Image (cartoon, rainbow, N blue to C red):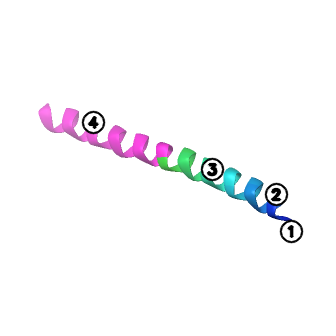
Amino acid sequence: MTPQDREEMEKRQKSRNLVLGGTLLFFVVLFYAITIVRIGD
């Protein structure tokens, strides 16, 4: 594996991790909002 291949793989992995983290954060906020709405009723 060349250093260029390694850099490309690390970039893809970092972007994938950011997308996964964003999705996880979205679901946490969504469940929090649903919980607040349900408790309010």
N-term-proximal mark, 4 vs 3 = 3
| Callout 1 amino acid | Met
Residue on which the image places disc 4: 33
| Callout 3 amino acid | Arg
| Callout 4 amino acid | Ala
- Compared to residue 2, the image places residue 11 above or below, namely above
- Disc 4 secondary structure class: helix
Quadrant in which the C terminus is drawn = top left
Task: Give residue 34's mark.
Answer: none
Residue at coordinates 54% horizontally, 47% vertically from top-left?
18
Q: Nearer the viewer, mark 3 or mark 1?
A: 1
Task: Give residue 1's mark.
Answer: 1
| Spatial separation of the CA atoms under disc 1 and disc 4 | 46 Å
Q: How many marks?
A: 4
N-term-proximal mark, 2 vs 3 = 2
Residue at coordinates 15% horizontally, 38% vertically from top-left?
39
N-term-proximal mark, 4 vs 2 = 2
- Disc 3 secondary structure class: helix
- Compared to residue 38, the image places residue 9 above or below, namely below
Q: Nearer the viewer, residue 33 or 11?
A: 11
Local crowd at mark 3 within 10 Å, few (<14), some, or many (≥20)? Answer: few
Residue on which the image places disc 2: 4
Check whether the beta carbons of the residues at disc 1 and disc 2 lie within 8 A of each other. Answer: no
Q: Nearer the viewer, mark 4 or mark 2?
A: 2
Tell me where the magenta segment starts and ends, as one range: 22-41
